[in-house]
Image: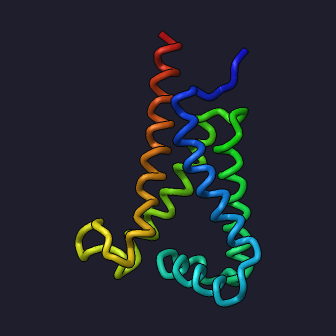
């Protein structure tokens, strides 16, 4: 019995997983100023996050990114499962991007110069959707 991962999925899983793992590890010991900045951006897009203390928020975000990065890098985790986690996480990031003024041109998702680093959230969401569409198609094919 082989692993629940197709060889063709590995490059995308490694790219997204490595990126998220690195991002989570870099936030692990965030100072107060960094925590306040990250929290402020997130809370600006999602006001319900204002009730969470910035350091706690960044620690939770760090743990989520590390866990998701490891899941994507671990070939024992089925691509559909890792893709579902990536879809939820990246959809939240895309939502934050679209709700944050100044990072995209008015009335358009096209990034401004300041928004280019955040626009990567769209390719993360695209990978996730691709993983999920393929998982559904494979399941339908097997059930025929």
Q: Residue 4 placed where, x, y %? A: 65, 26
**12 up-or-down from 94: above or below:** above
**110 up-or-down from 70: above or below:** below
Count of numbered tags: 0
Q: How is the image coloured?
A: rainbow
Question: Which quadrant does the N terminus fall into?
Answer: top right
Q: Residue at x 42, y 47 (%)?
A: 126
Q: Is residue 85 left or right of residue 112?
A: right
Quarter location, residue 71: top right
Q: Residue 12 placed where, x, y %? A: 52, 42
* Residue positioned most to the top: 144
Q: Residue 102 placed where, x, y %? A: 34, 81
Q: Residue at x 62, y 52 (%)?
A: 18
Q: Residue 25 placed where, x, y %? A: 71, 65
Q: Residue at x 67, y 67 (%)?
A: 61
Q: Is residue 34 left or right of residue 1?
A: left
Q: Residue at x 72, y 85 (%)?
A: 31
**74 up-or-down from 4: above or below:** below
* Residue positioned most to the left: 107
């Amino acid at each position: 019995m082989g692993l629940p991962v197709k060889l063709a999925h590995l490059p995308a899983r490694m790219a997204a997983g490595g990126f998220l793992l690195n991002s989570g590890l870099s936030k692990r010991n965030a100072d107060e100023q960094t925590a306040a900045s990250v929290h402020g951006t997130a809370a600006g897009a999602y006001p319900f996050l204002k009730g969470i203390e910035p350091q706690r928020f960044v620690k939770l975000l760090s743990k989520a990114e590390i866990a998701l990065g490891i899941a994507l890098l671990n070939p024992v985790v089925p691509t559909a499962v890792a893709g579902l986690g990536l879809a939820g996480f990246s959809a939240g990031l895309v939502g934050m991007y679209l709700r944050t003024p100044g990072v995209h041109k008015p009335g358009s998702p096209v990034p401004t110069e300041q928004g280019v680093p955040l626009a990567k959230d769209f390719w993360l969401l695209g990978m996730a959707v691709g993983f999920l569409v393929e998982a559904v198609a494979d399941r339908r094919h097997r059930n025929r």
